[in-house]
Image (cartoon, rainbow, N blue to C red):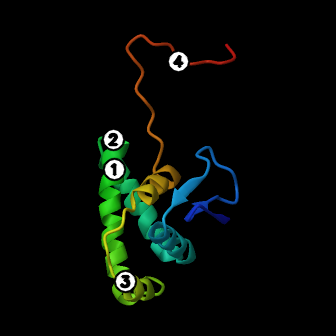
Amino acid sequence: MARWAGGLRLFFPERRTRFGAMSLNRAEQMVFDYLQQKPDEKRHWQDKVTRISARARDPHGAAGELEGELWRYFEERSAVASPFRETAQREGLRRTSLRNLAEHLLRLWAPVKAKPRAEGEEPWRPYA
């Protein structure tokens, strides 16, 4: 479900997640909606997010790398696919930040990395 608030489209997943609401700009929302509608594209990007996350040293580096990949994808789709083509014809193809979308996809699709315990640290047992 999406809702407009102050010129931004707020993305609310149908089921609540631990991440809460995510604010995406128009370009980010267009890419996200496109991926949701195209299962093959979605699978490709899930694999790409997993690979980038696995080799990145930290989440910020992964988000930066993924943002660049998403922009190249946006440019490529703007030449051939609707609604990207229509938007590029109407507004031109100006570099737009896709950082929020990159972070959102990492939260959705990247495997959670366990933090290493300090030497001698006991495992957390809430009911022990």
**How much space separates mark 4 and mark 2, taking CA atoms?**
24 Å
**How much space separates mark 1 and mark 2, taking CA atoms?**
6 Å
| Residue sitting at x 43%, y 66% | 45
Quadrant of the image occupied by residue 114:
top left
* Dots 1, 2 in contact, CB < 8 A: yes
Q: Could you tell me the amino acid type at mark 1?
A: Ala
The answer to whether 55 appears left or right of 42 in the picture is left
Q: Earlier in the sequence, mark 1 or mark 3?
A: 1
Quadrant location of the N terminus?
bottom right
Q: Circle 2 sits on which residue?
A: 58
User: Looking at the image, is mark 3 or mark 2 nearer the viewer?
Assistant: 3
Badge 4: few (under 14), some or many (20 or more) residues near its Cα, within 10 Å?
few
Badge 3: few (under 14), some or many (20 or more) residues near its Cα, within 10 Å?
some
- Mark 3: which secondary structure? helix
- Mark 1: which secondary structure? helix
The answer to whether 12 appears left or right of 33 in the picture is right
99 or 44: nearer the viewer: 99
User: Looking at the image, is mark 3 or mark 4 nearer the viewer?
Assistant: 3
**How much space separates mark 1 and mark 3, taking CA atoms?**
24 Å
Q: Earlier in the sequence, mark 4 or mark 2?
A: 2
Badge 1: few (under 14), some or many (20 or more) residues near its Cα, within 10 Å?
many
* Dots 1, 3 in contact, CB < 8 A: no
The answer to whether 64 appears left or right of 127 in the picture is left
Q: Position of residue 110 (x, y in %)?
A: 45, 51
Q: Earlier in the sequence, mark 3 or mark 4?
A: 3
User: Looking at the image, is mark 1 or mark 4 nearer the viewer?
Assistant: 1
Q: Circle 4 sits on which residue?
A: 123
Give the total number of marks visible in the rendering.
Answer: 4
Q: Could you tell me the amino acid type at mark 2?
A: Asp
Q: Circle 1 sits on which residue?
A: 62
Q: Circle 3 sits on which residue?
A: 78
